[in-house]
Image (tube, grey):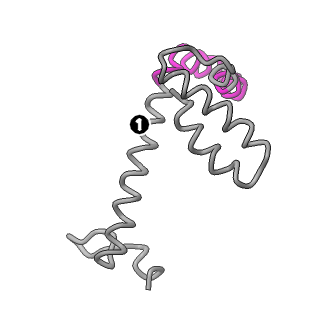
Amino acid sequence: MICIAALIVLGILGIFSVKYRVLAREALDCVLNRIKLRECESGFDRKAKMSVFKKLSWSPRLARFWYGRFELVSWAFVILFFAGLYFAVGGIYNLIIYGTCDPATGQCILANIAK
């Protein structure tokens, strides 16, 4: 489900470039159709799949793995994206409330930036 992660990333990039706004709209259509348990009508998922497939064509074995397991790899990226977002928001919250990213140890790289 690469459309979810792509929607968020392209939505942010779309603030700065029209090219990414068009892709963000396609990703939004894809996400809305997937929520309704339909296939993507815009073909955004196929475009994303082929875009990565073309870049991996130098390694046929890796390209075959990507192409055959696209949905599984997409879900892994979406889960990693939201896990990273969760921990980043938790660190920022702790930095604002406690003045450190990790209140248990008091260690934080960003502590000097926040002051």
* Count of numbered tags: 1
Mark 1 nearby-residue class (10 Å; few <14, some 14–19, many ≥20) = some
The image position of residue 84, as x and y in percent, is 42, 49
The image position of residue 102, as x and y in percent, is 28, 68
Taking 63 as reference, is 75 left or right? left
Task: Name above or below for residue 93 compared with residue 86.
Answer: below
The front one of 113 and 6 is: 6
Magenta region, mostly helix, strand or loop? helix
Which residue is at the far right?
A: 18
> Which residue is at a point 53% across and 14% down the rendered structure image?
38
Bounds of the magenta span? Answer: 48-72
Task: Name above or below for residue 63 compared with residue 95.
Answer: above
> Which residue is at a point 47% across and 24% down the rendered structure image?
35
Q: Quadrant of residue 93?
A: bottom left
The image position of residue 81, as x and y in percent, is 46, 43
Task: Name above or below for residue 68 compared with residue 83.
Answer: above
The image position of residue 16, as x and y in percent, is 74, 55
Disc 1 marks which residue? 79
Taking 39 as reference, is 77 left or right? left
Residue 98 within the magenta-colored segment of the rendering: no
Taking 63 as reference, is 86 left or right? left
Residue 55 within the magenta-colored segment of the rendering: yes
The front one of 100 and 20 is: 20
Amino acid type for the residue under numbered disc 1: Ile
* Quadrant in the picture for the C terminus: bottom left
Q: Quadrant of residue 40?
A: top right
> Which residue is at a point 55% across and 28% down the rendered structure image?
31
The front one of 84 and 7 is: 7
Which residue is at the far left?
A: 104
Taking 71 as reference, is 52 left or right? right
> Which residue is at a point 41% across and 58% down the rendered structure image?
88
Identify the element where label 1 is drawn.
helix
